[in-house]
Amino acid sequence: MQGAETNKNDHAYNRVPATARASLLNATLVRMGVMTSLSQFMVGATLGHSMSFGQAMLATVLGSLLLELVSLGMGLAGMSEGLSTSLLARWCGFGRIGSCLIGVFIALSLIGWFGVQNSVLADGLLHVSQGTLNFTAAAILSGLSITLLVLYGFSALSWTAKISVPLFFLVVVYILYDIVSGPDVLNFLDGQPNGPAMSLSQGATMVAGGYIVGALISPDICRYCKNKNHVLFMVTSSIIVGEIIINCLSVIVAHTLGTADVVTIMTHSAGGIGLVTVILSAIKVNDVNLYSASLGMATALDALTHRKWRYRWLTLILGLTGTALSVMGIIAHFIDFLILLGVLFPPIAGVMLVDYYVLRTHRALLDATRARHVLPDAATTPGIGWPAMAAWLGGSTVGLTCQLWIPSLNALLAGCLFYWLMAQAKQRITGRCRSDG
């Protein structure tokens, strides 16, 4: 009975055992499937619509380096411990209540992404229906369909990725060939963007914001990896393909077609196949959005109520919420949404990385319980890590207010520094109290 419940909840409340680890191919396909998606096309097309080609690619590289750093650090920790981000945060500075808040914020941000992607999928369905459906009906239909798919858990992610990722690459190759074979292939290098101007720091923060939640929740997928080499290959290859290559292509296409609308880009460049790719890619990435949102909310509610909530009921509720957001027009605030994510989440990763790799506050406890394939008990789990919460707030504030260089990196470094300084101050105070005693 316990095993059935664990499987139903996709190890939301426990470590992933060695017998449940996935192959390198399956794990990489899921990860790459998230990044080689229309959401990435949207980021690249928006950059190409507002920046020159050189500026857009520089912003892409800078944002990608930050994503690589966060993804590797978080992913390796998740693989070693077999824990999701929401669980790992309990013993990486934030405590039980702090990790609960992280889970809520992760879930809300991913549901926001669900709404954005569902809006794109609804636009694709409008093209298919040729006016039979209106946007509201299409958004409701697509949102409910994806929610039902995700109810079947992690295994559903693998087969949707196996279908959509190869098709996406075929369309990408076709679009690239169409552009390269044109007479004005090099004009994009000197072309001027058609949209409102965007600074380099804004562009890099937008790139980072486009996948910073995915970088932070790397343990959700990396906990299924078998070793460190699998994590390194999966993370690096997906960023090279999903960030650098896909962004490069989408920037070129945006310059060539003079639009940032991904549905227009795909259908104009690849016709009916492009439209099918729009639909399948949106389905695939929203699989992972809703899957990880459900994990985050499950652990958050567990921490608050001390009750194991049914994973499938949470998935249904969150899917309906994301569908409602798409109907209400969340896609109109896409750029603001990305920039907010780009400064809100890096400090969380900064705190967890400093605690896990530098301070090693609970590493001995995690090592001991990992050997017994259990989690630390409630008595050894901190209630709330106030220094971590303060560092999260301080780092996000720095990211929002300091516009020098890259706000996402500013937020990450500030979060790391604030948490380390507070830990040092706490250690000195504790040492003095012991000496006086």
Image (cartoon, rainbow, N blue to C red):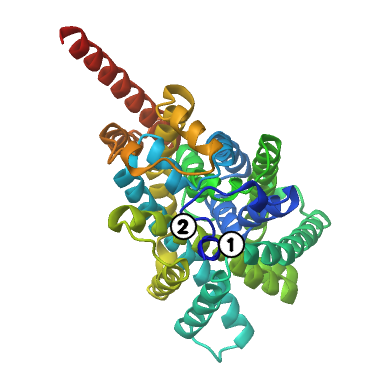
Quarter of the image for residue 112 reads bottom left
Q: Which residue is mark 1?
A: 285
Q: Is residue 63 visible?
A: no
Q: Amino acid at mark 2?
A: Leu
Image height of 165 relative to 359, above or below: below
Image height of 163 relative to 381, above or below: below
- The quadrant the C terminus occupies is top left
Q: Is residue 131 left or right of residue 366?
A: right
Q: Amino acid at mark 1?
A: Val
Q: Residue furthest bottom?
A: 132
Quarter of the image for residue 33 reads bottom right
Q: Residue at 63%, 59% (x, y): give it.
A: 37
Quarter of the image for residue 304 reads bottom left
Which mark lies nearer to you, 2 or 1?
2
Q: Is residue 340 left or right of residue 229?
A: left
Disc 1 is placed on an element classified as helix
Q: Residue furthest right?
A: 181
> Observer-nearest residue: 101 or 214?
101
Q: Residue at 52%, 82% (x, y): give it.
A: 141
> Observer-nearest residue: 264 or 353?
353
Q: Residue at 58%, 70% (x, y): give it.
A: 152
Disc 2 is placed on an element classified as helix
Whole-number angstrom distance, CA of label 2 to CA of label 1: 16 Å
Q: Which residue is mark 2?
A: 295
Q: Residue at 43%, 72% (x, y): give it.
A: 313
**Image location (x, y in percent) of residue 362:** 41, 30
